[in-house]
Image (cartoon, helix red, strand yellow):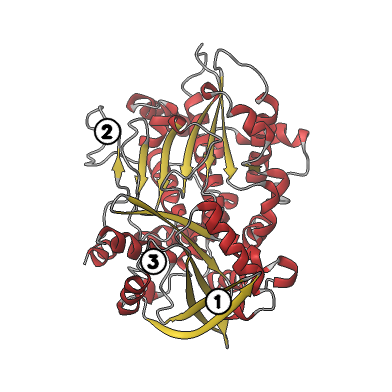
Amino acid sequence: MRSNNLINQELDMFSYKDPELWNDENIYDETQAPWFYHINNLLDLNKEDLINIKNVIDNDKKRGVVYNNILDVIDFETYYGIMRKINSSMNNVLSVYLFSCKYFLNKYSKEADTDGRVKFVFIFGNNTSDLDSVCSSIIYSFFLYIWYNLKSKIDKGSEDNGLMFFVPVINIKRGDMRLKILEKWWLEKCEIKNPEEILVFNDDEHLLDVLKYDHKYYICLVDFNTFETNNIYNKDNVKSIIDHHVYKGKGENHRITKSIYPICVCSCMVIIAYLYKHSSDFLGVPFVNKNTLWLMYGAILKDSNNFIKRDLGKRWIQSDLDIFLSLKRNFKISNKMDIYITYLFNTVRFSVNLKTFGIENVLFSDYKDYNYFICGKKIKIRVSSIDFSIDFLFSHEDSNRLVEKMYNLCHENNFSMFILIGSYLNNYKFQKDVSILFYKNDVDRDNLMNTLLANEEIKLSKKGYKSIRFGDNIQNFDIYQINNISYSRKRLENFLTIYFSES
Protein backbone atom coordinates (compact mmCIF):
# COMPACT_ATOMS: atom_id res chain seq x y z
CA MET A 1 0.00 0.00 0.00
CA ARG A 2 2.79 2.38 0.88
CA SER A 3 4.37 1.72 -2.51
CA ASN A 4 1.14 2.45 -4.38
CA ASN A 5 0.57 5.64 -2.44
CA LEU A 6 4.07 6.83 -3.27
CA ILE A 7 3.64 6.07 -6.95
CA ASN A 8 0.24 7.66 -7.37
CA GLN A 9 0.65 10.83 -5.36
CA GLU A 10 1.05 14.01 -7.38
CA LEU A 11 2.77 16.24 -4.86
CA ASP A 12 4.04 19.78 -5.27
CA MET A 13 7.16 19.99 -7.38
CA PHE A 14 9.57 20.04 -4.45
CA SER A 15 9.45 18.53 -1.01
CA TYR A 16 11.74 20.47 1.28
CA LYS A 17 13.25 20.07 4.71
CA ASP A 18 14.54 23.57 5.22
CA PRO A 19 16.67 25.17 7.91
CA GLU A 20 14.09 27.92 8.34
CA LEU A 21 10.95 29.32 6.82
CA TRP A 22 11.20 32.07 4.25
CA ASN A 23 10.94 35.19 6.41
CA ASP A 24 9.89 37.76 3.83
CA GLU A 25 6.15 38.10 3.62
CA ASN A 26 4.00 37.93 0.50
CA ILE A 27 6.75 37.20 -2.03
CA TYR A 28 4.76 34.16 -3.06
CA ASP A 29 1.91 32.36 -1.39
CA GLU A 30 3.79 29.11 -0.89
CA THR A 31 3.25 26.51 1.79
CA GLN A 32 6.71 25.11 1.09
CA ALA A 33 9.95 26.95 0.47
CA PRO A 34 9.82 28.56 -2.98
CA TRP A 35 11.89 27.60 -6.01
CA PHE A 36 14.53 30.26 -5.30
CA TYR A 37 15.42 28.96 -1.86
CA HIS A 38 18.61 27.36 -3.17
CA ILE A 39 19.97 30.54 -4.68
CA ASN A 40 19.09 32.37 -1.51
CA ASN A 41 20.93 29.77 0.53
CA LEU A 42 24.02 29.79 -1.68
CA LEU A 43 24.17 33.34 -2.99
CA ASP A 44 22.46 35.29 -0.18
CA LEU A 45 19.83 36.63 -2.53
CA ASN A 46 16.86 37.91 -0.56
CA LYS A 47 13.44 39.18 -1.61
CA GLU A 48 14.67 42.69 -2.27
CA ASP A 49 17.58 41.42 -4.38
CA LEU A 50 15.31 39.32 -6.56
CA ILE A 51 12.92 42.19 -7.14
CA ASN A 52 15.80 44.56 -7.90
CA ILE A 53 17.22 42.16 -10.49
CA LYS A 54 13.80 41.88 -12.09
CA ASN A 55 13.45 45.67 -12.09
CA VAL A 56 16.83 46.11 -13.81
CA ILE A 57 15.75 43.77 -16.60
CA ASP A 58 12.29 45.33 -16.89
CA ASN A 59 13.80 48.81 -17.09
CA ASP A 60 16.22 47.68 -19.81
CA LYS A 61 13.29 46.33 -21.81
CA LYS A 62 11.42 49.63 -21.45
CA ARG A 63 14.45 51.37 -22.95
CA GLY A 64 14.25 49.08 -25.96
CA VAL A 65 16.92 46.56 -24.99
CA VAL A 66 16.10 43.13 -26.44
CA TYR A 67 17.09 40.08 -24.37
CA ASN A 68 16.69 36.87 -26.37
CA ASN A 69 18.24 34.81 -23.59
CA ILE A 70 19.45 35.28 -20.04
CA LEU A 71 23.02 35.07 -21.38
CA ASP A 72 22.41 38.43 -23.06
CA VAL A 73 21.54 39.91 -19.66
CA ILE A 74 24.80 38.76 -18.07
CA ASP A 75 26.83 39.63 -21.20
CA PHE A 76 28.12 36.09 -21.59
CA GLU A 77 29.35 37.01 -25.09
CA THR A 78 32.17 39.10 -23.61
CA TYR A 79 33.12 36.27 -21.24
CA TYR A 80 32.93 33.84 -24.16
CA GLY A 81 35.36 35.97 -26.16
CA ILE A 82 37.85 36.23 -23.31
CA MET A 83 37.87 32.47 -22.71
CA ARG A 84 38.21 31.67 -26.41
CA LYS A 85 41.33 33.84 -26.58
CA ILE A 86 42.80 31.44 -24.02
CA ASN A 87 41.50 28.31 -25.74
CA SER A 88 40.05 28.76 -29.23
CA SER A 89 39.01 25.10 -29.54
CA MET A 90 35.94 25.72 -27.36
CA ASN A 91 33.07 26.41 -29.75
CA ASN A 92 29.83 26.67 -27.76
CA VAL A 93 28.44 28.08 -24.53
CA LEU A 94 28.82 25.01 -22.32
CA SER A 95 32.25 23.99 -23.55
CA VAL A 96 33.51 27.53 -22.90
CA TYR A 97 31.89 27.52 -19.46
CA LEU A 98 33.34 24.12 -18.53
CA PHE A 99 36.79 25.14 -19.77
CA SER A 100 36.58 28.27 -17.60
CA CYS A 101 35.63 26.18 -14.55
CA LYS A 102 38.78 24.12 -14.88
CA TYR A 103 40.90 27.10 -15.85
CA PHE A 104 40.00 29.13 -12.75
CA LEU A 105 40.20 26.09 -10.49
CA ASN A 106 43.77 25.55 -11.66
CA LYS A 107 44.56 29.26 -11.31
CA TYR A 108 43.27 29.80 -7.78
CA SER A 109 43.61 26.38 -6.17
CA LYS A 110 47.07 26.92 -4.70
CA GLU A 111 46.63 30.51 -3.57
CA ALA A 112 46.41 30.95 0.18
CA ASP A 113 43.50 33.47 0.03
CA THR A 114 43.36 33.82 3.80
CA ASP A 115 40.67 36.53 3.58
CA GLY A 116 38.25 34.18 1.77
CA ARG A 117 37.67 36.41 -1.24
CA VAL A 118 37.79 33.42 -3.62
CA LYS A 119 35.16 30.75 -3.01
CA PHE A 120 34.45 27.62 -5.02
CA VAL A 121 31.09 25.88 -5.14
CA PHE A 122 31.63 22.27 -6.21
CA ILE A 123 28.60 20.47 -7.61
CA PHE A 124 29.11 16.74 -7.09
CA GLY A 125 27.00 14.11 -8.84
CA ASN A 126 26.72 10.59 -7.47
CA ASN A 127 29.63 8.17 -7.59
CA THR A 128 28.07 6.19 -10.43
CA SER A 129 28.30 9.21 -12.74
CA ASP A 130 25.47 8.01 -14.95
CA LEU A 131 24.02 10.29 -17.63
CA ASP A 132 21.54 12.00 -15.29
CA SER A 133 24.21 12.64 -12.66
CA VAL A 134 26.79 14.02 -15.10
CA CYS A 135 24.36 16.25 -16.99
CA SER A 136 22.65 17.44 -13.78
CA SER A 137 25.91 18.54 -12.18
CA ILE A 138 26.82 20.53 -15.30
CA ILE A 139 23.41 22.15 -15.79
CA TYR A 140 22.90 22.99 -12.11
CA SER A 141 26.34 24.57 -11.82
CA PHE A 142 25.56 26.70 -14.89
CA PHE A 143 22.25 27.71 -13.26
CA LEU A 144 24.11 28.94 -10.18
CA TYR A 145 26.66 30.71 -12.38
CA ILE A 146 23.86 32.59 -14.16
CA TRP A 147 22.28 33.77 -10.91
CA TYR A 148 25.66 34.76 -9.48
CA ASN A 149 26.17 37.01 -12.49
CA LEU A 150 22.65 38.37 -12.19
CA LYS A 151 23.44 39.26 -8.59
CA SER A 152 26.41 41.29 -9.83
CA LYS A 153 23.94 43.51 -11.73
CA ILE A 154 22.81 44.95 -8.38
CA ASP A 155 26.10 44.56 -6.46
CA LYS A 156 28.23 46.86 -8.58
CA GLY A 157 30.71 48.79 -6.48
CA SER A 158 30.20 46.67 -3.38
CA GLU A 159 33.38 46.38 -1.32
CA ASP A 160 32.37 42.90 -0.20
CA ASN A 161 32.43 41.43 -3.69
CA GLY A 162 34.72 38.44 -3.99
CA LEU A 163 35.06 35.80 -6.66
CA MET A 164 32.87 32.72 -6.71
CA PHE A 165 33.27 29.85 -9.16
CA PHE A 166 30.75 27.05 -9.74
CA VAL A 167 32.48 23.84 -10.76
CA PRO A 168 30.69 20.59 -11.69
CA VAL A 169 32.62 17.56 -10.41
CA ILE A 170 32.26 14.20 -12.13
CA ASN A 171 32.38 11.95 -9.09
CA ILE A 172 34.70 9.27 -10.46
CA LYS A 173 38.40 9.14 -11.20
CA ARG A 174 39.43 10.60 -14.53
CA GLY A 175 40.71 7.24 -15.75
CA ASP A 176 37.30 5.64 -15.09
CA MET A 177 35.60 7.90 -17.62
CA ARG A 178 36.58 5.34 -20.27
CA LEU A 179 33.94 3.04 -18.73
CA LYS A 180 31.20 5.65 -19.23
CA ILE A 181 30.58 4.87 -22.89
CA LEU A 182 27.05 6.28 -23.17
CA GLU A 183 27.89 9.38 -21.13
CA LYS A 184 30.98 10.17 -23.20
CA TRP A 185 29.07 9.63 -26.42
CA TRP A 186 26.23 11.98 -25.45
CA LEU A 187 28.55 14.71 -24.15
CA GLU A 188 30.44 14.68 -27.44
CA LYS A 189 27.15 14.71 -29.38
CA CYS A 190 26.36 17.85 -27.37
CA GLU A 191 29.68 19.30 -28.58
CA ILE A 192 31.49 18.87 -25.27
CA LYS A 193 34.55 17.36 -26.89
CA ASN A 194 37.18 15.30 -25.06
CA PRO A 195 35.29 15.19 -21.74
CA GLU A 196 38.27 13.66 -19.94
CA GLU A 197 40.21 16.84 -20.70
CA ILE A 198 37.60 19.51 -20.10
CA LEU A 199 35.76 18.16 -17.03
CA VAL A 200 36.88 18.07 -13.40
CA PHE A 201 36.97 14.61 -11.77
CA ASN A 202 37.16 13.69 -8.11
CA ASP A 203 40.89 12.92 -8.31
CA ASP A 204 41.79 16.29 -9.86
CA GLU A 205 44.86 17.61 -8.02
CA HIS A 206 43.61 21.20 -8.03
CA LEU A 207 40.23 20.15 -6.63
CA LEU A 208 41.97 18.22 -3.85
CA ASP A 209 44.14 21.25 -3.09
CA VAL A 210 41.07 23.44 -2.53
CA LEU A 211 39.30 20.79 -0.45
CA LYS A 212 42.09 20.95 2.13
CA TYR A 213 40.76 24.33 3.27
CA ASP A 214 37.17 24.43 4.53
CA HIS A 215 36.89 28.21 4.13
CA LYS A 216 37.55 28.01 0.38
CA TYR A 217 34.54 25.99 -0.77
CA TYR A 218 30.92 24.90 -0.52
CA ILE A 219 29.47 21.61 -1.75
CA CYS A 220 26.20 20.96 -3.60
CA LEU A 221 25.03 17.42 -4.27
CA VAL A 222 22.85 16.48 -7.24
CA ASP A 223 21.28 13.09 -8.01
CA PHE A 224 22.76 12.16 -4.67
CA ASN A 225 20.30 11.51 -1.86
CA THR A 226 22.48 10.15 0.89
CA PHE A 227 26.00 10.75 2.11
CA GLU A 228 28.36 8.09 0.83
CA THR A 229 31.75 7.42 2.33
CA ASN A 230 33.81 10.31 1.05
CA ASN A 231 36.84 11.73 2.75
CA ILE A 232 37.72 14.33 0.17
CA TYR A 233 35.33 17.04 1.39
CA ASN A 234 33.92 18.18 4.71
CA LYS A 235 30.24 17.26 5.06
CA ASP A 236 29.68 20.45 7.04
CA ASN A 237 30.38 22.37 3.83
CA VAL A 238 27.39 20.84 2.04
CA LYS A 239 24.88 23.58 1.28
CA SER A 240 22.22 21.80 -0.77
CA ILE A 241 21.01 18.44 -2.01
CA ILE A 242 18.86 17.99 -5.09
CA ASP A 243 17.64 14.48 -5.80
CA HIS A 244 14.71 12.37 -6.96
CA HIS A 245 15.03 9.35 -4.68
CA VAL A 246 13.77 8.58 -1.20
CA TYR A 247 15.86 10.55 1.28
CA LYS A 248 17.45 8.31 3.90
CA GLY A 249 19.45 10.94 5.77
CA LYS A 250 19.72 10.47 9.52
CA GLY A 251 19.40 13.64 11.51
CA GLU A 252 19.26 17.10 10.09
CA ASN A 253 22.04 19.44 9.13
CA HIS A 254 20.25 22.75 9.46
CA ARG A 255 22.60 24.45 7.03
CA ILE A 256 21.41 22.28 4.17
CA THR A 257 18.36 22.87 2.02
CA LYS A 258 17.08 19.73 0.35
CA SER A 259 14.89 19.30 -2.72
CA ILE A 260 13.76 15.71 -2.63
CA TYR A 261 10.98 14.62 -4.95
CA PRO A 262 9.20 11.24 -4.75
CA ILE A 263 10.89 8.16 -6.13
CA CYS A 264 8.61 7.95 -9.20
CA VAL A 265 10.08 11.07 -10.80
CA CYS A 266 12.20 9.86 -13.69
CA SER A 267 15.24 12.14 -13.48
CA CYS A 268 17.06 14.60 -11.26
CA MET A 269 17.30 16.77 -14.36
CA VAL A 270 13.52 17.28 -14.18
CA ILE A 271 13.93 19.19 -10.91
CA ILE A 272 16.73 21.33 -12.32
CA ALA A 273 14.76 22.01 -15.52
CA TYR A 274 11.95 23.37 -13.36
CA LEU A 275 14.43 25.66 -11.61
CA TYR A 276 15.31 27.07 -15.04
CA LYS A 277 11.62 27.39 -15.94
CA HIS A 278 10.61 29.18 -12.71
CA SER A 279 13.58 31.54 -13.07
CA SER A 280 12.59 32.32 -16.65
CA ASP A 281 8.96 32.91 -15.68
CA PHE A 282 9.98 35.25 -12.86
CA LEU A 283 12.40 37.40 -14.88
CA GLY A 284 10.58 37.18 -18.21
CA VAL A 285 13.69 36.04 -20.08
CA PRO A 286 14.42 32.52 -21.41
CA PHE A 287 17.04 30.67 -19.34
CA VAL A 288 17.53 27.62 -21.58
CA ASN A 289 19.65 27.87 -24.73
CA LYS A 290 20.38 25.24 -27.36
CA ASN A 291 23.50 23.98 -25.60
CA THR A 292 21.86 23.51 -22.20
CA LEU A 293 18.74 22.14 -23.89
CA TRP A 294 20.41 19.03 -25.28
CA LEU A 295 21.92 17.96 -21.96
CA MET A 296 18.52 18.42 -20.30
CA TYR A 297 16.70 16.68 -23.13
CA GLY A 298 19.02 13.66 -23.26
CA ALA A 299 19.01 13.02 -19.50
CA ILE A 300 15.21 13.18 -19.23
CA LEU A 301 14.60 11.19 -22.42
CA LYS A 302 16.95 8.43 -21.36
CA ASP A 303 15.67 8.08 -17.79
CA SER A 304 12.02 8.20 -18.89
CA ASN A 305 12.64 5.67 -21.68
CA ASN A 306 10.80 8.08 -24.02
CA PHE A 307 7.71 8.28 -21.80
CA ILE A 308 6.13 4.95 -22.70
CA LYS A 309 2.49 5.13 -21.58
CA ARG A 310 2.59 1.92 -19.57
CA ASP A 311 5.35 3.46 -17.42
CA LEU A 312 3.14 6.35 -16.23
CA GLY A 313 3.18 6.35 -12.43
CA LYS A 314 6.00 3.82 -12.43
CA ARG A 315 8.95 5.30 -14.27
CA TRP A 316 7.60 8.84 -14.79
CA ILE A 317 4.72 11.08 -13.80
CA GLN A 318 2.93 13.98 -15.47
CA SER A 319 5.30 16.63 -14.08
CA ASP A 320 8.19 14.92 -15.92
CA LEU A 321 6.33 14.91 -19.21
CA ASP A 322 5.14 18.51 -18.81
CA ILE A 323 8.64 19.97 -18.52
CA PHE A 324 9.94 17.69 -21.29
CA LEU A 325 7.19 18.80 -23.67
CA SER A 326 7.83 22.42 -22.72
CA LEU A 327 11.48 22.06 -23.74
CA LYS A 328 10.47 20.39 -27.00
CA ARG A 329 7.93 23.07 -27.87
CA ASN A 330 10.34 25.93 -27.26
CA PHE A 331 13.01 24.40 -29.48
CA LYS A 332 10.71 22.71 -32.02
CA ILE A 333 11.91 19.16 -31.37
CA SER A 334 9.77 16.56 -33.13
CA ASN A 335 8.55 13.22 -31.81
CA LYS A 336 10.67 11.61 -34.53
CA MET A 337 13.75 13.03 -32.82
CA ASP A 338 12.71 11.34 -29.55
CA ILE A 339 12.48 8.00 -31.33
CA TYR A 340 15.76 8.53 -33.16
CA ILE A 341 17.75 9.54 -30.06
CA THR A 342 16.25 6.66 -28.05
CA TYR A 343 17.33 4.32 -30.83
CA LEU A 344 20.86 5.77 -30.72
CA PHE A 345 20.98 5.46 -26.93
CA ASN A 346 20.08 1.78 -27.19
CA THR A 347 22.51 1.22 -30.04
CA VAL A 348 25.38 2.64 -27.96
CA ARG A 349 24.27 0.80 -24.80
CA PHE A 350 23.89 -2.62 -26.37
CA SER A 351 26.90 -2.63 -28.68
CA VAL A 352 29.72 -2.94 -26.14
CA ASN A 353 32.36 -5.55 -26.97
CA LEU A 354 32.95 -7.43 -23.72
CA LYS A 355 36.34 -8.76 -24.79
CA THR A 356 37.81 -5.30 -25.29
CA PHE A 357 35.75 -3.55 -22.62
CA GLY A 358 36.39 -6.22 -19.96
CA ILE A 359 33.44 -8.19 -18.65
CA GLU A 360 34.11 -7.19 -15.03
CA ASN A 361 33.83 -3.51 -15.97
CA VAL A 362 30.08 -3.82 -16.65
CA LEU A 363 29.71 -3.79 -12.85
CA PHE A 364 30.84 -0.14 -12.76
CA SER A 365 28.87 1.32 -15.65
CA ASP A 366 25.73 2.10 -13.63
CA TYR A 367 25.25 1.14 -10.00
CA LYS A 368 23.86 2.36 -6.70
CA ASP A 369 24.65 1.35 -3.12
CA TYR A 370 21.86 1.18 -0.55
CA ASN A 371 22.00 0.98 3.23
CA TYR A 372 19.27 -0.60 5.35
CA PHE A 373 19.00 -1.56 8.99
CA ILE A 374 17.59 -4.71 10.61
CA CYS A 375 17.48 -4.68 14.41
CA GLY A 376 20.17 -2.04 14.46
CA LYS A 377 22.43 -3.98 12.09
CA LYS A 378 23.50 -2.29 8.85
CA ILE A 379 22.72 -4.09 5.59
CA LYS A 380 24.63 -2.76 2.60
CA ILE A 381 23.56 -3.71 -0.91
CA ARG A 382 24.93 -2.89 -4.34
CA VAL A 383 22.65 -2.97 -7.37
CA SER A 384 24.30 -2.83 -10.80
CA SER A 385 22.24 -2.10 -13.90
CA ILE A 386 23.83 -3.81 -16.89
CA ASP A 387 23.12 -3.55 -20.60
CA PHE A 388 23.40 -7.29 -21.14
CA SER A 389 21.31 -10.27 -20.24
CA ILE A 390 22.52 -11.69 -16.91
CA ASP A 391 22.01 -15.14 -18.39
CA PHE A 392 24.34 -14.16 -21.25
CA LEU A 393 26.98 -12.77 -18.88
CA PHE A 394 27.03 -15.93 -16.78
CA SER A 395 27.41 -17.99 -19.97
CA HIS A 396 30.33 -15.89 -21.21
CA GLU A 397 33.78 -17.46 -21.36
CA ASP A 398 35.08 -14.82 -18.91
CA SER A 399 32.20 -15.15 -16.42
CA ASN A 400 34.69 -16.29 -13.76
CA ARG A 401 36.32 -12.83 -13.87
CA LEU A 402 32.91 -11.20 -13.43
CA VAL A 403 32.00 -13.29 -10.39
CA GLU A 404 35.43 -12.95 -8.82
CA LYS A 405 35.14 -9.15 -9.12
CA MET A 406 31.70 -9.29 -7.48
CA TYR A 407 33.16 -11.25 -4.57
CA ASN A 408 36.06 -8.83 -4.21
CA LEU A 409 33.72 -5.84 -4.20
CA CYS A 410 31.53 -7.47 -1.56
CA HIS A 411 34.58 -8.12 0.61
CA GLU A 412 36.07 -4.64 0.15
CA ASN A 413 32.79 -2.78 0.74
CA ASN A 414 31.12 -5.10 3.26
CA PHE A 415 28.14 -5.77 0.98
CA SER A 416 25.55 -8.27 2.18
CA MET A 417 24.13 -8.68 -1.32
CA PHE A 418 25.07 -7.88 -4.90
CA ILE A 419 22.15 -7.59 -7.32
CA LEU A 420 22.53 -7.61 -11.10
CA ILE A 421 19.70 -6.23 -13.24
CA GLY A 422 20.14 -6.93 -16.94
CA SER A 423 18.53 -5.01 -19.81
CA TYR A 424 18.86 -6.40 -23.31
CA LEU A 425 17.24 -6.81 -26.72
CA ASN A 426 15.90 -10.19 -27.81
CA ASN A 427 14.59 -10.25 -31.38
CA TYR A 428 14.37 -6.45 -31.16
CA LYS A 429 12.22 -6.67 -28.02
CA PHE A 430 13.39 -5.04 -24.80
CA GLN A 431 13.69 -7.50 -21.90
CA LYS A 432 15.09 -7.66 -18.37
CA ASP A 433 16.45 -10.32 -16.04
CA VAL A 434 18.00 -10.39 -12.58
CA SER A 435 20.23 -12.45 -10.33
CA ILE A 436 21.29 -11.96 -6.70
CA LEU A 437 24.51 -12.89 -4.94
CA PHE A 438 23.92 -13.35 -1.21
CA TYR A 439 27.44 -12.76 0.02
CA LYS A 440 26.68 -12.77 3.75
CA ASN A 441 24.09 -14.55 5.85
CA ASP A 442 22.53 -11.48 7.45
CA VAL A 443 19.62 -11.39 4.97
CA ASP A 444 17.06 -14.21 4.96
CA ARG A 445 17.52 -15.41 1.40
CA ASP A 446 14.41 -17.58 1.21
CA ASN A 447 12.14 -14.93 2.69
CA LEU A 448 13.42 -12.19 0.42
CA MET A 449 13.18 -14.32 -2.72
CA ASN A 450 9.69 -15.57 -1.83
CA THR A 451 8.58 -11.97 -1.25
CA LEU A 452 10.03 -10.91 -4.60
CA LEU A 453 8.42 -13.85 -6.41
CA ALA A 454 5.06 -12.97 -4.85
CA ASN A 455 5.38 -9.30 -5.77
CA GLU A 456 2.86 -8.42 -8.47
CA GLU A 457 4.83 -5.42 -9.69
CA ILE A 458 8.12 -7.04 -10.67
CA LYS A 459 6.52 -10.28 -11.95
CA LEU A 460 9.51 -12.60 -11.59
CA SER A 461 9.71 -16.06 -13.12
CA LYS A 462 12.54 -18.58 -12.94
CA LYS A 463 14.69 -18.37 -16.05
CA GLY A 464 17.74 -20.50 -15.41
CA TYR A 465 20.60 -21.59 -13.20
CA LYS A 466 24.35 -21.18 -13.55
CA SER A 467 27.24 -22.65 -11.59
CA ILE A 468 30.44 -20.67 -12.03
CA ARG A 469 33.90 -21.64 -10.88
CA PHE A 470 36.43 -18.94 -10.03
CA GLY A 471 39.73 -19.86 -8.44
CA ASP A 472 39.03 -22.59 -5.91
CA ASN A 473 35.43 -21.47 -5.41
CA ILE A 474 32.10 -22.30 -7.01
CA GLN A 475 29.13 -19.93 -6.92
CA ASN A 476 25.61 -20.94 -7.91
CA PHE A 477 23.25 -18.36 -9.37
CA ASP A 478 19.50 -18.45 -9.90
CA ILE A 479 18.46 -16.22 -12.80
CA TYR A 480 14.98 -14.74 -13.02
CA GLN A 481 13.11 -13.07 -15.85
CA ILE A 482 11.56 -9.69 -15.00
CA ASN A 483 8.26 -9.88 -16.86
CA ASN A 484 7.38 -6.26 -16.17
CA ILE A 485 9.81 -4.44 -18.44
CA SER A 486 8.82 -1.14 -16.81
CA TYR A 487 10.40 -2.32 -13.57
CA SER A 488 13.49 -0.29 -12.75
CA ARG A 489 16.21 -0.05 -10.14
CA LYS A 490 14.30 2.82 -8.56
CA ARG A 491 11.29 0.55 -8.12
CA LEU A 492 13.53 -2.11 -6.59
CA GLU A 493 14.93 0.53 -4.24
CA ASN A 494 11.41 1.31 -3.09
CA PHE A 495 10.63 -2.39 -2.64
CA LEU A 496 13.76 -2.94 -0.54
CA THR A 497 13.06 0.16 1.56
CA ILE A 498 9.62 -1.22 2.47
CA TYR A 499 10.86 -4.80 2.86
CA PHE A 500 13.63 -3.96 5.32
CA SER A 501 11.48 -1.46 7.25
CA GLU A 502 8.98 -4.25 7.88
CA SER A 503 11.58 -6.95 8.67
Whole-angstrom CA distance, mark 1 to mark 3, is 17 Å
Give the mark, 3 or 2, whose residue is nearer the N terminus.
2
Return the mark for residue 27.
2
In the rendering, at what x and y percent does residue 313 appear? 32, 68
**Secondary structure beneath disc 2?**
loop
In the rendering, at what x and y percent does residue 186 appear? 63, 59
Q: Are marks 1 and 3 in contact (CB under 8 Å)?
A: no
**Secondary structure beneath disc 1?**
helix
Give the side of residue 32 with respect to residue 334, left or right: left
Q: Residue at x 58, y 71 (%)?
A: 387
In the rendering, at what x and y percent does residue 98 appear? 64, 41
Give the side of residue 374 with respect to residue 181, left or right: left
Give the mark, 1 or 3, whose residue is nearer the N terminus.
1
In the rendering, at what x and y percent does residue 113 appear? 61, 16
| Residue 446 vertical placement versus 268 (above, below) | below
Image quadrant assignment for residue 189: bottom right
Whole-angstrom CA distance, mark 3 to mark 2, is 40 Å
Give the mark, 2 or 1, whose residue is nearer the N terminus.
2
Say if residue 54 shows up in the picture.
Answer: no
Amino acid at circle 1? Ile
In the picture of the structure, the residue carrying the numbered disc 3 is 492
Whole-angstrom CA distance, mark 2 to mark 1, is 53 Å
